Image: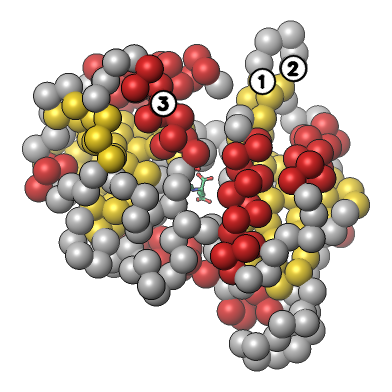
Amino acid sequence: MSLKTKKIWMDGAMIPWEEAKVHVLAHALHYGTAYFEGIRCYAVTNGRSAVFRLQEHIRRFIDSGQILGFPLPYSSAQLEQATLEVVRANDLKECYIRPLAFVGLGDMGLYSPDNPLQVIIAACRWGAYLGEEGIRDGIRAKVSSYARHHVNVMMTKSKIAGNYVNSVLAKNEVKKAGYDEAIMLDTEGYVSEASGENIFLVRDGVIKTTPLNSILPGITRSSIVSIARDRGYHVKEERFTRDELYTADEAFFTGTAAEVTPIREVDDRRIGSGRPGPITGEMQETFFKVI
Ligand code: PPE
């Protein structure tokens, strides 16, 4: 994947991609004090493009800053406008958009409240997160030995960069063992979410997803919950265990990058028929129609 494009929006201005740089002593690089978003823009009809649920992503971006205690110095209208400008400036019909705010250069040390908060919005080309084959045939997941953050250890409702070290550990662990994606349990042992996706299961026609306790409140998750309820399915937001996942008829991941990706195996156990199930297919198809 090449991240090279023409322009990046940085601290209020559009600048050449090559010039969007950061100093090695920036606070965020040492302590993970940054937060980000992941947004997709899709080609729609008449050669036009549309950003999927931009307002909701910008709202979560603002929430992340509020939670970290380094709030964004821009309004939601300014950030939405800047996002659209980045897509246009790079002539991208379809792209993945990455807004990022980070505590920059100033003092050394954890308590550096006067360091500047810098903000960038970049876009890049990004295809199927877990592969085209994964979207079509489903992926093989493994429960990681790393637990998801306890809600008093990390602020799980924000996309704070430092939180993601936990995801990187889990993802690397299962990839090295030959699997595609890591499922993480919460500190009580219930299924939480994947390294970069929320999780759903289906059993006897009922759809379940984890409640918003230890997980990131996924925007794709909320789209799927709405789609499923509109279509008359009973959707339960309640905790479930790893063995409940093993005995599901179907399971799938949701995320901006992963979109709707079926899970065909968990911990070497085949889920359902080992092929994406009918309800997963219906959710996927409706989601792709909506976007
Ligand atoms: N949980 C986590 C931990 C997570 O990172 C994501 C998004 C989700 C759930 C799904 O949220 P949403 O995108 O709003 O439906 N993960 C982003 C980053 C992936 C990456 O590798 O970087 C994403 O999908 O953009």
Q: Which residue type carries mark 3? A: Ser
- Image point 54% across, 58% down: which residue? 159
Distance between mark 3 and mark 1 Cα atoms: 23 Å
Q: Quadrant of residue 64?
A: bottom right
Pointer 2 local density, CA inside 10 Å: few below 14, some 14–19, many at least 20: few
Horizontal and vertical percent position of residue 221: 41, 37
Marks 2 and 1 in Cβ contact (< 8 Å): yes
Figure check: 217 above or below 47: below
Q: Which residue type carries mark 1? A: Ala
Frontmost residue, 180 versus 55: 55
Dot in front, 3 or 2: 3
> Is residue 184 at least partly visible in the picture?
yes
Residue 107 placement, left or right of 29: right
Ranked by sequence position, the earlier of labels 2 and 1 is 1
The residue beneath circle 2 is 48
What secondary structure is marked by label 2? loop
Ranked by sequence position, the earlier of labels 3 and 2 is 2
Looking at this view, name the residue that lies furthest to the top. Answer: 46
The residue beneath circle 3 is 226
Residue 241 placement, left or right of 178: left
Quadrant position of the N terminus in the picture: top right
Q: Quadrant of residue 51?
A: top right
Marks 3 and 2 in Cβ contact (< 8 Å): no
The residue beneath circle 1 is 43
Q: Quadrant of residue 78?
A: top right
Horizontal and vertical percent position of residue 43: 66, 20
Q: Which residue type carries mark 2? A: Arg
Quadrant position of the C terminus in the picture: top right
Horizontal and vertical percent position of residue 218: 46, 43
